[in-house]
Image: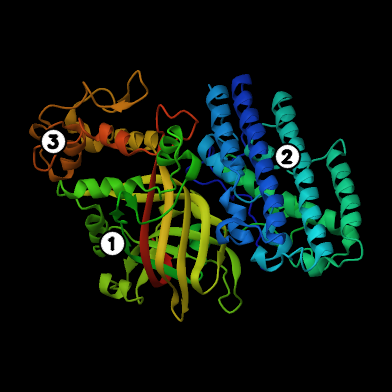
């Protein structure tokens, strides 16, 4: 299994970054800001603890051939069968709501994104067992000693993880209080710190348990991953480095942290943790690349979307069914429901998206930098990059897999060669479900009038059937799923309406706002007859979003849109079902090989 090196800029993406990448300016946090950061990290440690508990349960159930519903061990690791991870994530969002009266300028500033990051892969199961994990798990009925060893090691590492996250939290809190930690780099430096030796004592205790549980066994036979060559007496130390990698990557994904995870995990520059990025977009080296040539908004059949994801305990159907003593496990896709309802109004979202793809307005690439397609399966960093056609490329050639593309500079973190949207770690192999990427954030273009509104979709997972071809990689039956915050949606609309494009409206305050019940509305601020003052074609979007005459052509949606979005919102992200803070989004895609020849001027 290939593992990559992290640059000092990884995780400074647009959605989570609090400073320009590489900034080292001192940013002393007020006591209120410190309270916020400490609350998120403390709750994040509980999320990681829940993940570790799940990890042990999955290994134990797999050994006993007792995984539910035909799951593999790998399925179990992300399924949250007991619901503990979801509960801990809600606890993090609740803690943020209570403690974050002042937004910090370092560390996480988006509780939902942080919750997803902490729940991702802090234990680095694939690094210990190899990929897929299921191949390494032994059945207790056939090898009781081996199963006992595997479960004991995983349980012991969960306790080491707890010690590491506790010391990380302590380092951050003490450093901010003493005003010695005042930058994203300062938080990154807390990974693996152990001034009192508490982590080392936890490692030593874990090794004693491993010695007892795994007496006479060989590491490579039961843990054929990155520690396979180590003697059993050194397994806890080796696995501890894997945990440092997981904690470091988790901290980066949660936002507002700069760290070199390759050095943080074992003190060596040996390409052991995270992807590596160049200093500028001009130095970016694309790998095998795929161009998304077609998208499909899933159908609604018998009141259930045909794709893509069930958010489980935080979804509206689950919560409402549970309230009356029933169960529901429908797929969640509010975007598909919205698209289905708009068809009758003459607004075909799928058609508009594909028209935007076909005229080159939307050109999205999935890049696999550094991937060796002759050595699969692989773990890698998937980059989602906006682009432009070049060298006489048109849709016919692009969709045939022979198009040439220039990468947009806006697809990179400003001043770096790091893509804004990175899915790490992702796994790839040829065949059905060959791609598994996420979670990460992806900007999704929604057509409004003559413009596209880029909206940040959070907790995005991507999967697809994969084929390696001479010119790149192609995907069939692709699925992209995540969620959009209702607040982000209306903030994006306000940003557009408040921009110079819509100066013709003459409004003096943002048109969409939250009422006393915490619901978004345009009541009292929608513009009467905006078409009379916004007469240019480029201003038609302003008319559509600010006007309230839904019967006009095209319809004006200010009066109706908030209730529509409120009606389809289907995710409870803060354990308060009085309001639904997010709406699920999923679509399907097809992708063909693409040739990247450079970056836009």
Q: The N terminus lies in which quarter of the figure?
A: bottom right
**Furthest residue in direction front, as rendered:** 325
Residue 287 coordinates in the image, percent (x, y): 51, 70
Which residue is the site of mark 3?
550
Q: Classify 10 Å Cα crowding around label 2: few (below 14), some (14-19), many (20 and above).
A: many
Depth check, front residue: 453 or 9: 453
Left or right for 407, reference 165: left
Q: Are marks 1 and 2 in contact (CB under 8 Å)?
A: no
Q: Classify 10 Å Cα crowding around label 1: few (below 14), some (14-19), many (20 and above).
A: some
Pick whichever of labels 2 and 3 is earlier in the sequence: 2
Q: Quadrant of residue 508?
A: top left
Which residue is the site of mark 2?
165
Left or right for 485, reference 228: left
Nearer the viewer's eye, disc 3 or disc 1? 3
Depth check, front residue: 409 or 314: 314
Left or right for 5, reference 572: right
The residues tagged by marks 1 and 2 sit, at their Cα atoms, a distance apart of: 44 Å
Please say whether residue 601 is visible from this viewpoint.
no
Pick whichever of labels 1 and 2 is earlier in the sequence: 2
Which residue is the site of mark 1?
357
Q: Secondary structure at mark 2?
A: helix
Q: Secondary structure at mark 1?
A: helix
Residue 510 coordinates in the image, percent (x, y): 29, 26
The residues tagged by marks 3 and 1 sit, at their Cα atoms, a distance apart of: 28 Å
Nearer the viewer's eye, disc 1 or disc 2? 2
Depth check, front residue: 282 or 532: 532
Residue 46 coordinates in the image, percent (x, y): 66, 37
Q: The C terminus lies in which quarter of the figure?
A: bottom left
């Amino acid at each position: 299994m290939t593992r990559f090196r992290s640059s000092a800029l990884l995780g400074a993406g647009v959605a989570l970054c609090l400073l320009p990448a590489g900034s080292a300016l001192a940013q002393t946090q007020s006591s209120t800001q410190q309270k916020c950061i400490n609350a998120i990290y403390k709750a994040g440690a509980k999320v990681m603890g829940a993940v570790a508990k799940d990890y042990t349960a999955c290994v134990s159930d797999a050994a006993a051939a007792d995984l539910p519903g035909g799951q593999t061990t790998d399925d179990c690791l992300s399924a949250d069968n007991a619901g503990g991870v979801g509960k801990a994530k809600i606890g993090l969002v609740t803690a943020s709501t209570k403690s974050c009266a002042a937004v910090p300028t370092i560390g996480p500033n988006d509780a939902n994104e942080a919750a997803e990051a902490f729940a991702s892969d802090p234990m680095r199961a694939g690094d210990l067992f190899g990929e897929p994990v299921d191949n390494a798990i032994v059945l207790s009925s056939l090898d009781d000693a081996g199963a006992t060893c595997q479960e004991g090691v995983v349980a012991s590492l969960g306790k080491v993880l707890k010690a590491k996250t506790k010391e990380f939290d302590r380092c951050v809190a003490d450093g901010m209080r003493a005003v010695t930690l005042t930058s994203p780099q300062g938080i990154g430096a807390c990974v693996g710190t152990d001034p009192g030796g508490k982590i080392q004592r936890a490692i030593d205790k874990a090794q004693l348990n491993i010695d007892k549980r795994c007496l006479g066994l060989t590491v490579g036979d039961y843990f054929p991953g990155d520690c396979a060559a180590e003697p059993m007496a050194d397994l806890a130390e080796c696995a501890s480095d894997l945990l440092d990698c997981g904690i470091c990557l988790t901290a980066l994904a949660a936002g507002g942290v700069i760290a070199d995870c390759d050095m943080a995990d074992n003190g060596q520059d040996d390409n052991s943790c995270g992807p590596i990025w160049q200093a500028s977009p001009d130095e970016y080296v694309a790998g095998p690349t795929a161009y998304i040539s077609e998208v499909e908004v899933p159908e609604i059949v018998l009141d259930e979307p045909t794709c893509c994801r069930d958010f489980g305990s935080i979804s509206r159907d689950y919560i409402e069914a549970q309230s009356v003593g029933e169960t529901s496990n429908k797929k969640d896709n509010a975007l598909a429901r919205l698209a289905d309802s708009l068809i009758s109004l003459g607004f075909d979202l799928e058609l508009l998206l594909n028209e935007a793809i076909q005229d080159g307005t939307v050109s999205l690439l999935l890049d696999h930098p550094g991937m060796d397609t002759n050595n699969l399966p692989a773990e890698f960093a998937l980059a989602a990059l906006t682009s432009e056609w070049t060298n006489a490329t048109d849709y016919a050639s692009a969709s045939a897999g022979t198009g040439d593309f220039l990468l947009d500079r806006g697809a990179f973190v400003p001043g770096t060669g790091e893509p804004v949207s990175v899915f790490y770690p992702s796994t790839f192999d040829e065949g059905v479900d060959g791609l598994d990427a996420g979670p990460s954030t992806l900007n999704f273009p929604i057509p409004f009038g003559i413009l596209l509104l880029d909206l940040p979709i959070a907790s995005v997972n991507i999967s697809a059937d994969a084929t390696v071809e001479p010119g790149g990689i192609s995907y069939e039956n692709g699925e992209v799923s995540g969620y959009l915050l209702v607040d982000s949606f209306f903030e994006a609309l306000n940003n557009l309406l408040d921009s110079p494009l819509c100066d013709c409206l003459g409004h003096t305050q943002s048109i969409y706002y939250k009422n006393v019940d915490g619901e978004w509305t345009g009541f009292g601020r929608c513009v009467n007859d905006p078409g009379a003052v916004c007469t240019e074609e480029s201003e038609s979007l302003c008319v559509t979003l600010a006007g309230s005459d839904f019967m006009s052509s095209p319809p004006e949606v200010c009066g109706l849109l908030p209730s529509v979005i409120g009606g389809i919102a289907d995710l409870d992200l803060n354990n308060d079902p009085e309001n639904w803070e997010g709406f699920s989004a999923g679509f399907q895609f097809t992708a063909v090989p693409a040739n990247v020849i450079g970056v836009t001027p």
